[in-house]
Amino acid sequence: MVDAPVRLTSLDAFRGFTIAAMVLVNNPGDWSHLHAQLAHAAWHGWTFTDTIFPFFLFIGGVAMALSLGRLAAAGADKPQLLVKLAKRAFLIFLIGFLLNLIPRFDFETVRIPGVLQRIALCTLLAAPLVVYLTWRGQALAILVLLALYSVSMLAVPVPGIGAGVLAPGQDFGAWIDRTLMDGHLWVQAKTWDPEGLVSTLPAMCSLLFGALAGRLLLSRLARGEQVVWLMLAGLACLALGSTLDAILMPINKSLWTPSYCLLMTGWALLAFGASYWLLDAAPSSALRERMARLCTPFVIYGMNALFIFALSGLVAKMLGFIKFTQADGIQLALGRLLYAPIAALPLDPRNTSLLYAIAFNACMFAIAWWMWRRRWFVKV
């Protein structure tokens, strides 16, 4: 291995694209009118929206490997690295938990899992594997984790239901979540949670795949060769994920099945590989500079990704819960002032809903741009 490279424009751009997509799909003008690709698959299957979270975990894995390489080169020892990552995981979990508490601060019913909480758990659990294992050991860990998850989901009987049932709320993971966190699960379901404990194991594999990609970037291979390996690995993961979809468990984001994990890793490798080639690895400096200018908005987003994600979630909650009167909220008032004129346009309701999401995203980007201009980067 070699020293970690200078900060990669491609990684910031890919992270920024992912956060922009996440803000877009999380904040439509009308949840009842969505384009199919801007909503999660109802259960089995996948849409564009289902690519976003695994992309973010993959990116986190790449960044973890590069960061560890940089810190190791600076002389940090392995226990210090683990402490640093554990502190980061705790802070991310705390932010996610606080967002769930807002606005009622009801500890008796607060949802414990969440997107940031899953990122934190994946970071905490994957850190020792990334710090202490070779790339071969890390690959073996992925295989073991996916096998353990598959056996648990398919072979362990759920009381009153049986083994291998993958219907909503009836799988092994949902049973574990109810046993440990009953009353603190996703309010839309109550009997299961899309960020539950058991499915965190394959989600951690998404991060570990990213760490393997990061290790590749730390290798002595020429950047052009690195791109080829990223692309080949992406195609292999797509093929393997599609195969497992047919013979093991269907692609399912809520369960984070192995087929889903591998398929999304495949797309992440292909997308990042393309970004890496265009922004960092292409032999033509003119092409790299031209693409860097085009991708500057995504780079700006990517420099404060977690902050923007948390802020967008907080703002969305405040729009729904801060009241002007007992029965009226900011969201309804803004609907009359902003969304109603958009909805009155002679457009498909799905497009007016999308326009609101784009406007919300533009507001978040304005904040990210303002922070970027002042060199304010919130490090978690």
Image (cartoon, helix red, strand yellow):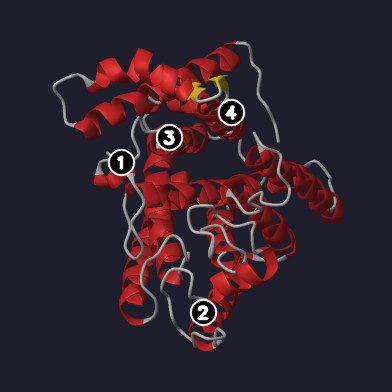
Q: Residues within 10 Å of mark 3 (few under 14, many from 20)?
A: many
Residues under numbered marks 2 and 4 in contact, where contact means CB atoms less than 8 Å apart: no
Label 1 sits on a secondary structure element that is loop
Position of residue 152 measured from the top left corner of the image (x, y, whole percent): 56, 81
Under tag 3, what secondary structure?
Answer: helix
Residue 360 found in image quarter: top left
- The count of marks equals 4
Residue linked to disc 2: 153
Name the residue at 37% across, 76% down. Answer: 244
The CA span between labels 2 and 4 is: 35 Å
Residue designated by label 1: 32
Q: Is residue 259 left or right of residue 9?
A: left
Query: Which amino acid lies under the numbered mark 4 shown in the image of this protein?
Result: Leu
| Residue at numbered disc 3 | 17
Which residue is farthest left?
346
Image quarter where the C terminus lies is top right
Question: Which callout, 4 or 1, points at the residue further toward the start of the chain?
Answer: 1
Q: Which residue is mark 4?
A: 311
Residue 184 seen: yes
Residue 134: which numbered mark, if any?
none
Closest to the observer: 144 or 356? 356
The quarter of the picture where the N terminus appears is bottom right
Q: Earlier in the sequence, mark 3 or mark 4?
A: 3
